[in-house]
Image (cartoon, rainbow, N blue to C red):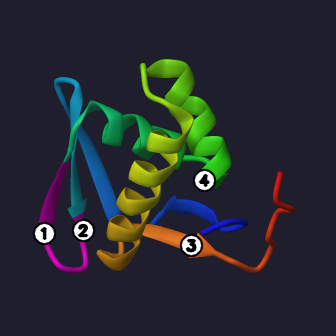
Amino acid sequence: MNGSIFSVSKSAVACPMGKDIAVLDMDSNVYYSLNPVGAAIWEQLQSPSSLDEVCTAITRRFDVAADVCRADASALLSTLSRAGLVKVDNAHPQPNK
């Protein structure tokens, strides 16, 4: 996932539910629910973002260690990508920091 750029798929529609977000995949008509941290990641992906950018935003907003954030965000992004809710662009890898 290093160097990948993530963004919300055009087939995904989101609706806030308190601090959570419900996401509908218009292609499969399946709803997904994201907790407040997942919702913050979803918000970050409204603009194409790298894993580093996602984790920077999350660690600023929530009390979470960078390594824990990276592992959890990576797992969520993989899940959302497999579900078709997030697009992954590997065409423009960023250098490792």
Name which residue type carries label 4. Leu
Task: Return the x and y of residue 8 as percentages of the image width and height.
Answer: 47, 59
Q: Quadrant of residue 94?
A: bottom right
**Residue under the image location 24 percent in, 41 percent down:** 15
Task: Return the x and y of residue 59 as percentages of the image width and height.
Answer: 53, 27
Task: Return the x and y of residue 3 as percentages of the image width and height.
Answer: 73, 66
Between the C-alphas of marks 4 and 1, the distance is 25 Å
Q: Which of pointers 2 and 4 lies earlier in the amino acid sequence? A: 2
Disc on res. 43: none
**Helix, strand or loop at disc 4?**
helix
Mark 2 packing: few (<14 Cα in 10 Å), some, or many (20+)? some
Between the C-alphas of marks 3 and 2, the distance is 16 Å
From the image, tell me which residue sits under label 3: 88
Mark 3 packing: few (<14 Cα in 10 Å), some, or many (20+)? many
Nearer the observer: mark 3 or 1; the answer is: 3
Between the C-alphas of marks 3 and 1, the distance is 20 Å
From the image, tell me which residue sits under label 2: 25
| Span colored in magenta | 25-33
**Helix, strand or loop at disc 1?**
strand
From the image, tell me which residue sits under label 1: 30
Between the C-alphas of marks 2 and 4, the distance is 22 Å
Name which residue type carries label 2. Asp
Query: Is 21 or 72 nearer to us in this picture?
Result: 72
Mark 1 packing: few (<14 Cα in 10 Å), some, or many (20+)? few
